[in-house]
Amino acid sequence: MTLAEAPLFSVIMATWGRGRHIAPSIRSVLEQDFADFELIVVGDGCQDETEATVAGFRSEKVRWLNLEARCGSQSAPNNAGIAAARGKVVAYLGHDDIWERHHLSSLAALYAARSDLDFAIGGMIMHLPAGLPGAQVTGMFEGGEAQHRHFFPPSSVSHLRSVTSRIGPWRLSDEVSAPVDMEIFKRAADAGLAFASTGRISVHKFNAAYRYLSYLEPSSEEQDAILTAMQAPDHAAWIDKVVAESKACNAFMNVQFEDYSGFAPGELARRNLIRRGLRSVETVALGLGARIEQVPSHCALDWNDEPVDGIRWSKLNPAPKFLLPFTAEDPARLSLQVYHADPAGLRHLDLSCNGTRIKVARDKLFTNGRLWRATFVCVVTLKP
């Protein structure tokens, strides 16, 4: 394809803060079994190594754009990508999500079969962090009414490029109460635009909102792992198994639109910034010691948002993270009070700090008749 030839698909990937870890997502686009596409990677005012990572692919199919000022959501990058797009159809891919090789070919077949179609949706598995069971499956539907109830994350969504000229662009997060992706797709459904599903799983989503503080220490381990798994001979059977399990645990087609009218514009976006570690945290130099009180906070799947009697209880993630809002030039002594209903649960504690595993010592067990408590002590090296 030359620049004079418009492709069928313009793939838009909005990005910020992923740096070199965007590479697996780009690979999943370039390895598609359908070649009639361009990929437009749009930085939201990126100042890291993202541009160099994109350039490293040395592909004429890939273009890099970078906004002068950061928007703080995918809205402005998506609008810029659509404005630069040459394809008849726009397809989105999150910078931490992965496409199966047949994603674009499945969408193309659906558009070829439906001349009235505005939106084509691919089936998606929404993976939980740390390999937790219970992955959600969405984008698998028949008929033309699902779009009024169900939300399809952008990585599963494609639409005619003309759609935004008919219903308007992506709106900024401080202009709407709902998440920006829910808002535009609900607007499209309410406008009567036609939706259809490929009926095939072709997208793997690794939701940053489920991965507490994920932007503080970016990683692409999950993305690399799924790209490797896609090469296995039993991969299709594994997909079928995940879908069956999602149906068994009521996680199939249960991602639905909600009523966000009670939230102030931008409020949910600000909460997501906290979960992802994108909200700036004021750090202080550690002096003679400090105590971290447990206060309400938005902790995704790592911790319950609300402490109970001063105790922060763990949630689903077996390896939860906690932010230490201090800086120090010298090693620091960290003391953690840990509670458990079963004393066996307090035999040992595995900890790492800034990627380095640390040695932990435990004192005696105490009980109030209902809960057991132990204090674990270690020495950590904080970032200066």
Image (tube, rainbow, N blue to C red):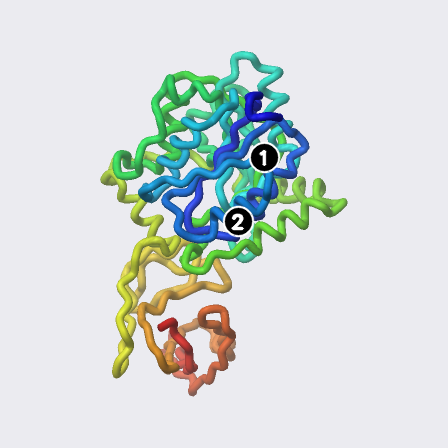
2 or 1: tag closer to the N-terminus? 2
Name the foreground residue: 295 vs 77: 77
SS assignment at label 2: helix
For the question of whether residue 155 can be seen, the reply is: no
Circle 1 sits on which residue? 60
Where is residue 315 drawn, in percent x and y? 43, 59
Give the residue at x 57% y 23%.
7
When the figure is inspected, residue 230 is found, relative to residue 331, above or below; the finding is above
Cα separation between marks 2 and 1: 14 Å
Give the residue at x 41% y 26%.
83
Quarter of the figure that contains the C terminus? bottom left
Give the residue at x 45% y 84%.
362
Circle 2 sits on which residue? 53
Where is residue 43 drawn, in percent x and y? 42, 42
Q: Residue furthest right?
A: 233
Left or right: residue 93 compared with residue 167:
right
Quarter of the figure that contains the N terminus? top right
Name the foreground residue: 335 vs 55: 55
Left or right: residue 36 compared with residue 256:
right
Where is residue 369 drawn, in percent x and y? 38, 78
Q: Residue furthest bottom?
A: 364
